[in-house]
């Protein structure tokens, strides 16, 4: 028994030793952002001491700079509203499209699904010029509503493709039983299919929300007024001036913007893991 216990201890030590570098790589950026956001400027640029901890008392002045000398609250609200609109539009469109392609045996459905995914792989820098004509025709230049129109062009294809995989893993017998119980096609999808594939819907929603909060290219091209900017563009335009970087305020903004995504991932972590497992099995 003692030999088996020692063997188990060594096995766990080897596993944790192998995981330790990956944990450091994952955690260190968050740690660095956090301490930089609370450091004094004089403490940030001291090269004669180890920079991994505070040598002067922590400060909140970088956060005060964001909220009193910039439009950060407005940018943050714009980004969150944009993300919510995008999640709703993407799910309302992608869920029925994915179900139709995966379950209704439409001619060429498989090839159409692959073609939709291929559109997601097209570099955004190629598309923003033709999309600019669409935005201009709708009169949405210099408004974050332009992004509500543009972003679904690459969230819907990807989310449709990924949701197709989840719908294909669901046994058809479950839907047939729902139909026998009196549910129509829409009722069966809403009452049976969606609850059983909630992890897939959660993954699509998290992907869409994260993309809306961090996308930069379209936001900087289509939206110029400060009160309409998203947080990624506003921070870059305000806190980076030539070769001067306001590192403390930049890291404070990164910390505040990253919190909603981190909370969202933690809330739906179980769904996220089950969704990835189901996708891999498919």
Image (cartoon, rainbow, N blue to C red):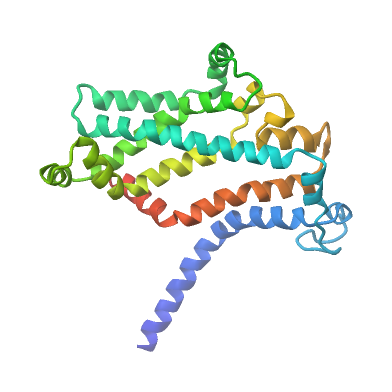
Left or right position of 9 against 234 = left
Residue at left offset 42%, top offset 30%: 156
Which residue is most to the front?
Answer: 182
Which of the two residues, 110 or 61, is positioned nearer the viewer here?
61
Indicate the position of residue 45 as horizontal and vertical percent values: 86, 51
Please state the total of marks drawn on the protein image.
0
Indicate the position of residue 33 as horizontal and vertical percent values: 70, 52
Q: Quadrant of the N terminus?
A: bottom left
Which of the two residues, 24 or 102, is positioned nearer the viewer here?
102
In the displayed structure, 186 sits above or below 123; it is below
Which of the two residues, 235 or 276, is positioned nearer the viewer here?
235
Indicate the position of residue 242 as horizontal and vertical percent values: 83, 31
Residue at left offset 60%, top offset 59%: 24
In the displayed structure, 154 sits above or below 162; it is above
Which residue is most to the left?
Answer: 180
Residue at left offset 54%, top offset 38%: 83
Indicate the position of residue 278 as horizontal and vertical percent values: 31, 48
Which residue is most to the bottom?
Answer: 2
Q: Quadrant of residue 40?
A: bottom right
Q: Quadrant of the C terminus?
A: top left
Residue at left offset 47%, top offset 69%: 14
Left or right position of 262 against 232 = left
């Amino acid at each position: 028994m003692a030999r088996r216990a020692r063997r188990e201890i060594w096995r766990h030590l080897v596993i944790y030793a192998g995981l330790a570098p990956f944990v450091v790589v994952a955690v260190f950026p968050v740690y660095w952002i956090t301490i930089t956001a609370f450091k004094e400027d004089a403490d940030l640029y001291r090269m004669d001491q180890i920079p991994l901890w505070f040598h002067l008392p922590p400060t909140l002045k970088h956060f005060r700079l964001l909220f009193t000398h910039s439009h950060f609250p407005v940018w943050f609200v714009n980004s969150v509203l944009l993300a919510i609109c995008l999640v709703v539009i993407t799910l309302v469109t992608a869920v029925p499209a994915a179900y139709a392609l995966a379950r209704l045996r439409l001619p060429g459905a498989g090839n159409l699904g692959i073609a939709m995914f291929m559109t997601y792989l097209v570099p955004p820098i190629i598309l923003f010029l033709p999309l600019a004509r669409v935005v201009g025709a709708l009169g949405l230049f210099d408004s974050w509503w332009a992004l509500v129109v543009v972003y679904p062009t690459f969230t819907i294809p990807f989310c449709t493709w990924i949701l197709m995989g989840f719908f294909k893993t669901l046994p058809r017998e479950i839907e047939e039983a729902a139909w026998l119980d009196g549910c129509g096609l829409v009722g069966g999808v809403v009452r049976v299919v969606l609850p059983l594939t909630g992890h897939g819907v959660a993954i699509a929603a998290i992907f869409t929300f994260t993309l809306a909060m961090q996308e930069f290219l379209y936001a900087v091209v289509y939206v110029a007024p400060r009160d309409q900017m998203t947080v990624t563009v506003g921070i870059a335009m305000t806190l980076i001036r030539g070769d001067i970087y306001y590192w403390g305020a930049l890291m404070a903004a990164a910390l505040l913007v990253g919190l909603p995504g981190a909370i969202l991932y933690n809330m739906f972590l179980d769904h996220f893991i089950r969704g990835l497992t189901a996708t891999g099995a498919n």
